[in-house]
Image (cartoon, rainbow, N blue to C red):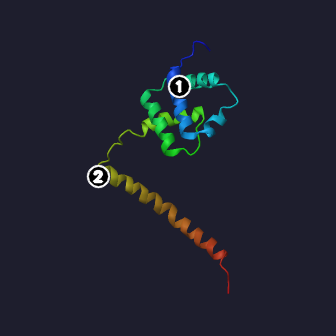
Amino acid sequence: MENEKKLNTALVKKIINKLKSMYGSRFVDIWSCITVEEMVSAWAIGLAGLSSAEIDHGLDACLQNCKYPPSLPEFRQLCKNGFQQYDVPKRMTPEEKEKEWAEYREIASRHLPGLMERVAKIAEQYRVKT
């Protein structure tokens, strides 16, 4: 365990304090079963390898999207996904757009007519006769 890679402890404490300021007792209560030192150690190991930009994105994602405090694995995933969400998507050419829409139209023509017929039959079965 001692040779495991860890994130800087001071940085982990800052992350934990930011999460405490966002979630208050909700965050603290999740970790009440272990000591602060154990928590810092767990998060230092769990967040190892993340860049400061990824961590900032994880904190932003919490602020923007998370009503409840994340677990350690959830926070790590937010850091990774948050970092990726800022990548600029590749722009499609008009030909690529048309090809994609043609595929959508073809799928819809195969599946929607049958679906609409089934919905109509089900609706007919439940209609109240007067």
Q: Dividing the image into 4 quarters, which one contains the C terminus?
A: bottom right
The quadrant of the image that shows the N terminus is top right
Residue extending farthest right: 33
Q: For residue 119, which quarter of the picture? A: bottom right
Q: 111 or 55: which is nearer to us?
A: 55
The label number, if any, that marks residue 94 in the structure image: 2
- Measured along the vertical axis of the image, is residue 108 above or below residue 59? below
Q: Does residue 4 sit above or below 123 in this rendering?
A: above
Mark 2 vs mark 1, CA separation in Å: 47 Å
Please tell me the numbered disc located at residue 12: 1
Q: Residues within 10 Å of mark 1 (few under 14, many from 20)?
A: many
Q: Is residue 48 above or below residue 77?
A: above
Identify the secondary structure beneath mark 1: helix
Relative image position of residue 125 (x, y in whole percent): 66, 75
Numbered disc in front, either 2 or 1: 1
Q: How many marks?
A: 2
- Residue 84, given in percent of the width and then of the height, sits at 43, 37
**What amino acid is labelled 1 in the image?**
Val
Residue sitting nearer the eye, 8 or 98:
8
What residue lies at 47% left-to-right and 61% top-to-bottom? 108
Residue at the image point whose x is 65% and y is 78% from the top: 127
For the point 51% across and 61% down, the residue is: 111
Residue 39, quarter of picture: top right
**Residue 91 appears at what percent x and percent y?**
32, 45
Q: Residue at x 58, y 32 (%)?
A: 73
Residue 124 x/y as whole percent = 63, 76
Q: Residue furthest top?
A: 3
